Image (tube, rainbow, N blue to C red):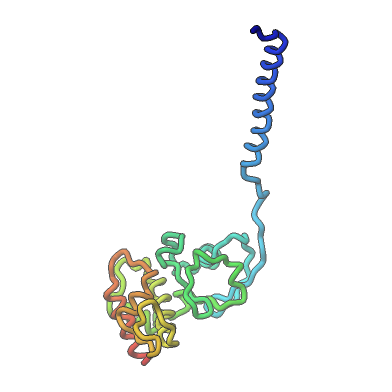
Amino acid sequence: MSVPHDFELNRRDLMVGGSTLAAMTAVPAAVKAQPNSTGGAALSNISLTVNGQAHALELDTRTTLLDALREHLHLTGSKKGCDHGQCGACTVLIDGRRVNSCLTLAIMNEGMEITTIEGLGAPDQLHPMQAAFIKHDGYQCGYCTPGQICSGVAVLGEIKAGIPSHVTPDLMQPVTASDEEIRERMSGNICRCGAYSNIVEAMTEVAGRQG
């Protein structure tokens, strides 16, 4: 049976038209997938209290606390290591709690008390944790040391407050600054030089002084 000539033309037109329509609908989808331009940074005026001193800053709202400390306040003791919250080199104290400053925005910490390694002690009046790190050689290259010390101060505060950890053997008994407790709580602070045993010794000495 022969197919009418006009039917073949209509079929051909249908195929061409369908292909054209598919191409036309695909273009807007590709355009929509492109990132939109923000047209510039959004700035905000904020006040940060760092080491007991208030600082008025105008910052991009996306600025991390670490970048605000280092690039705007020139407090370079807090180090940028992995910049992903995995090494602990950027650890600071916020209202007494240890925080990875690379993972929190500066604008989120307005009105809070921020303490960096520069605020813990001075060369002529060291914080007990700083002095213990020096005595026990709790560092080698020193890059992670500011974060280790800030974290160590917070860890001993947690233990003194009786806050248990994953390795606390008895929740009904006082928490003690055992080597196991210290190592578990300090596990988020990486020392690539491997000074871990000396760090534990330093913290144990400070914990003994605190009683």
Q: Nearer the viewer, residue 64 or 11?
A: 11
Q: Could you tell me which quadrant the N terminus lies in?
A: top right
- Which residue is at the far bottom? 211
Q: Nearer the viewer, residue 73 or 182?
A: 182
Residue 113 placement (x, y as % from top left): 55, 78
In this view, 8 is above or below 40: above
Residue 74 placement (x, y as % from top left): 51, 66
Q: Is 158 positioned to the left or the right of 105 in the image? A: left
Residue 13 placement (x, y as % from top left): 70, 17
Residue 29 placement (x, y as % from top left): 65, 38
Q: Can the viewer see residue 125 in this picture? A: no
Residue drawn at the location 30% of the way across and 80% of the way down: 179
Q: Quadrant of residue 82?
A: bottom left
Q: Is 178 positioned to the left or the right of 105 in the image? A: left
Residue drawn at the location 66% of the way across and 20% of the way down: 15
Q: How many marks?
A: 0
Q: Is 32 positioned to the left or the right of 158 in the image? A: right
Residue drawn at the location 34% of the way across and 79% of the way down: 181
Q: Is 181 positioned to the left or the right of 96 in the image? A: left
